[in-house]
Image (spheres, rainbow, N blue to C red):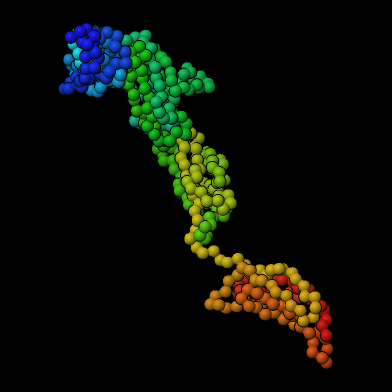
Amino acid sequence: MTPARRLTAILLAFCALIAGCGGSVGPSPVVNDPLAITVQPASAVIYPGVATTLVITGGTGSYVVVSDNQAIVPIVSQATGHSLTIIANPVSADTSVNLSVRDTGTAPQKLVALTVRPGTIANAITITPSSAACTPAICTGEEALVTATISQAGIPLPARGVRFDVVSGDVRFITTPVNTSPEVLATTVLTTSDQLGQARVRLRVLPGAPNQTALIQITDPETLAFQRVAITVRQVPGPGNTAFFVIPDTVTFTGPFANTCANNPTASIVIFGGTPPYNVVATVPLSGGGIVTASGTPVTIRGNGSTCFTDIPVTITDATGRTIVATFSSQQGTGTAPPAAVTIVPGSAAITACGGSVNLAIQGGSTTLGAAFGVASSSSAVTVAVTGRTITATRVTSVAPAPPVPSASPVTISATDGTTTGTASITVPTTCP
């Protein structure tokens, strides 16, 4: 086979997948030397839990990687492109692990020498609250001391830089000295280990923080080894270990009718425990609250207008920053709204001639079982008749030789459904022969 054909055969070789305790690296976008495999770095010191990436080039571009200590450096997945990321498991002492890298052709196998060193962040991380009121948690608004030990194979590492980060939750690190005002808080702080390899930082739980679990991370910047620690935050009980609560903690207003929410509703809540005075803050569309000076004092909360709303908070904070919440909702009712009051339209009209008439309409109101609306006139000179919701008012005339029929003007026409009454004013001729 000519050298050119041999090279073509190597480049087109099938990529074999890992079996057993090995792994494979996909085709490399860069093949520097088809007859030799290159791994960068060729040797490395790595730490448990910290990702290390190897770059592999040369050969056919398809590789099989095998670890001689699968328990310490497992090869668990195929790499992406020409890189392989490895993560070591914890060790108690320096441990040597060799990786063998071969391609799918005839290039010589390449060995990578790894030294796995114990992690520098010890698992024995302590968190000491300044108060035992919420033990084992930290009370809202209070301080705690976080201590981490930096060591290598049990040997303390003094003067080592250590980074503390807030991963999640309402906790912050105090960056100012003790008894310094104002206190400065941060989510990240750098410090240095002492002669015993211990790094310490002060931690503050934010005032008003609800019950929660926060996460912080301690990192050795030199090795990138890290540990994460969960911190439990609890609302501190009041004096004498009394609870801090509100009754009721859920209020629902209900409107009188379907499609209608309550109009300007009010309700009282009562706060107990904690440390007075309390600051009660209502969220729009609610109003009310303010400063409450004593436990057991009712507080009036109002809904503004007839707006419907769901789970609107009223926040209650005591003198130490502990916070509880009552929620308010306003929902539609289920009843049937009564009809509108009876009215007559137009509200005023005129009959200009004797014997003339005018029609008026009844709006609103309701009658049952087909009963008619009751109608009446304030003058006998004007007669009224009703058909359905139509009123006909007529100016009567005399029949000769009877005298003329006098009338005051205007005349009031009324209609009623038995519950409400509407009226209209009609101008008429005062005399009709």
Q: Who's the residue at 39% across and 34% down the image?
A: 212
Q: Who's the residue at 51% across and 64% down the image?
A: 336
Q: Is residue 80 above or below residue 352?
A: above
Q: Tell me if 319 is positioned left or right of 13 in this view.
A: right
Q: Is residue 164 above or below residue 372?
A: above
Q: Quadrant of the N terminus?
A: top left
Q: Is residue 103 above or below residue 20?
A: above
Residue farthest along the left direction in this orientation: 20
Residue farthest along the bottom direction in this orientation: 401
Is residue 149 in sight in this rendering?
Answer: no
Q: Tell me if 262 is positioned left or right of 159 in this view.
A: right
Nearer to the camera, 325 or 351: 351
Q: Quadrant of residue 402?
A: bottom right
Q: Quadrant of residue 54?
A: top left
Nearer to the camera, 155 or 2: 2
In the rendered image, residue 237, in percent from the top left (x then y), is placed at 41, 37
Q: Who's the residue at 44% across and 33% down the image?
A: 209
Q: Who's the residue at 54% across and 42% down the image?
A: 283
Q: Tell me if 165 is positioned left or right of 268 in this view.
A: left
Q: Quadrant of the C terminus?
A: bottom right
In the rendered image, residue 194, in percent from the top left (x then y), is placed at 36, 11
Nearer to the camera, 65 or 360: 65
